Amino acid sequence: MRDQTGAQSSAALDVVLLVSRARGLARAGELDSALRLLRQAEGTDLGGHRDVLDLRARVHAQRGETAEAAQCWQRVLAGHPQDAEARAGLARLGRTGPVAALGRHRARTALVAAACVVTAVVAGVVTTLDGPGTARADTDRAAGRQSPGGQDKPGGRNPGDGATGASGAEGAGQDKDPAAARRSAALAHDLRAPGLRVTVRGDAVEVVFAQGLFSEGAQLTPAGARQLALLGERLGGRHLAVTVHGHAATVPGAPRSGGSVIALWRALVAARELGAASGEPLTAFTTDSADQRDAPHPDPARNRTVTLVISPE
């Protein structure tokens, strides 16, 4: 039994190392080398791993090889029929319409964000490499400044349940720059949409999503992906500084403060989606794990989400 456990751990580490190396090459623009490295694992258990196939699909998509990308994602679905990333990838390959930017840019930005995610994986969440069923327990161990919510910070903000496109001027009186206040108010007006609570806070705008964006772990729901894509399109072409705070649902025995890896991962995924839809580089986004006491909702399930703080520059 001990030998079997050791073999599984070794295999998981092999996946982490392969994906990390390939993502590093892709991030540096060496797509041919990244694809060659991933193909070398073909015919082995490593080559059929969900994360290896998913990365191959993204590299193919970045190279414009849609048939090959589709084949890799179909292989992912053969082993993980409910894999939201593979389903979304296949759907995006031929997508047109208001969220077309998501399909055009996501393969490129996903490679950059994923390199950050690998750091979190190596830090102690290797199990998340096994597919969408891995992090589903939301066992949010402290690593950063995260926020598995369900618990309102005493004296802190609580956007409440009625998050439907409202904008306020809370905190505007503290803004010493009238021009900045006007820019924030104009931005809040432009971002208002059903399912969002948009609030002006000084010279920045806070965006809270009415419903959770993630079903489990860092897997976006279809509705969550659409909301991020549509919001990202509204952010495109503007000079903005965007901070993405990840949150997570509280589960029994989980830390009540200090943040979590799951929340940080969600912030990275959301930044990737926003960057892909807006056409903005990932350097335009700052990500972190919010503290559990800063959860945006009293309902734990709705705290599988992110909140944004956006400042016009």
Image (spheres, rainbow, N blue to C red):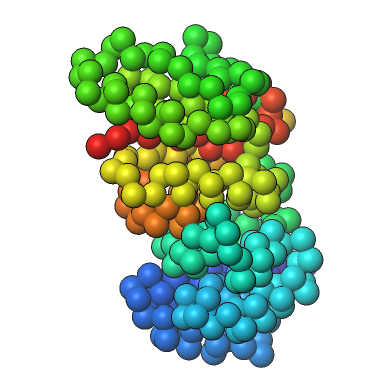
Q: In which quarter of the view is residue 109 placed?
A: bottom left
Relative to 259, is 287 above or below?
Answer: below
Q: Position of residue 150 (x, y in %)?
A: 65, 24
Frontmost residue, 248 versus 81: 81
Frontmost residue, 140 versus 89: 89
Left or right: residue 218 versus residue 207 is right
Q: Which residue is drawn at 63% across and 45% down?
A: 224
**Residue reaching furthest front?**
97
Q: Residue at x 29, y 12 (%)?
A: 174
Q: Where is residue 285 in the image (x, y as percent from the top left)?
A: 37, 46
For the N terminus, give its image quadrant.
Answer: bottom right
Residue 29 visible here = yes
Relative to 111, is 256 above or below?
Answer: above
Q: Residue at x 74, y 70 (%)?
A: 77
Q: In which quarter of the view is residue 173 placed?
A: top left
Q: Residue at x 60, y 71 (%)?
A: 93
Q: Where is residue 78 in the image (x, y as percent from the top left)?
A: 78, 74
Frontmost residue, 2 versus 160: 160
Q: Position of residue 117 (x, y in %)?
A: 49, 56
Relative to 142, is 1 above or below?
Answer: below
Q: How many marks?
A: 0
Left or right: residue 59 versus residue 204 is right
Residue 309 visible here = no
Relative to 130, is 148 above or below?
Answer: above
For the C terminus, give its image quadrant.
Answer: top left
